[in-house]
Amino acid sequence: MKKADYIKDLTTTVYCQHTRSDFARNTDFHIHDCCEVYYLYEGTVTIYVDGSCYVLKAGDILLMSDLEIHKILAHSGSVFSRKIVHIYPDYVRPYGTEQTDLLACFYNHPVGKNNLIHLDYSKQKEYESYFDKLSTGPSDKYGDDISYRIALVDFLISINIWQQSQDNIIDPICDERIAPIMDYIEKHLTDSFTLDDIAKDIYMDKYYMCHMFKKLTGAPSFNTFV
């Protein structure tokens, strides 16, 4: 994979996407030039973020900064629906204050750690309401541009409050047996490599490695990672 292939650029300051399918659009490792709020509306999906694996269920939010490379794995035969919001950091920063850093939820944790939050039913509905407002975008009506920015600020304040509620934080899968596999993949993103290359580097039987990885991460196939 070439570097240019895994840097995904967006063209708007706030970009909302609601997609329902049985496959992941970005099947390669990639990183955005913006922050991403990935909300799983329906189904189950596995997402790799740097050195961690997260198994998302409906009602989960995954927060990813522009520093975190990731990859989405659809579970075979399973339909999943997601409501995603991409936000450019430079667009949001002017609305923050010394007391309230609106981007803190994306950057106040180590890369690949504490990315996942589970929302209860009422907060799921709150997120979906914010998403509907943001995805519509501002109209030409007087004051609507300001109302849109207020909705964006309110959205990020809520995300930060949910993220700071430690009871809602879900730990990633960080099994010590997975770590060397993830490290190898991340270090060789721009290279061409095979399962045999990984197994040889970490001194593990290829078939055992594939079985273990699938069992621990829920990924339908190890081949979807390479």
Image (spheres, rainbow, N blue to C red):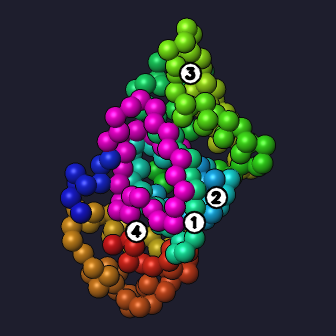
Q: Position of residue 217 (x, y in %)?
A: 54, 73
Measured in 3D between alpha carbons, the distance from the residue under mark 1 to the one under mark 4, in whole angstroms, is: 26 Å
Residue 150 seen in the figure: yes
> Sequence-wise, which precedes: disc 3 or disc 1?
1
What amino acid type is highlighted by mark number 4?
A: Met
Label 2 vs label 4, nearer the camera: 2
Of callouts 2 and 4, which one flags the residue occurring earlier in the amino acid sequence? Answer: 2
- Residue 50 x/y as whole percent: 42, 58
- Image side of residue 168 versus residue 103, left or right: right
- Identity of the amino acid at label 2? Glu
Q: Which residue is mark 2?
A: 42
| Mark 3 → mark 1, Cα distance in angstroms | 32 Å
Numbered disc 3: secondary structure: helix
Mark 2 and mark 1: Cα distance apart in space: 8 Å
Q: Nearer the viewer, mark 3 or mark 1?
A: 1
Residue at mark 3? 148
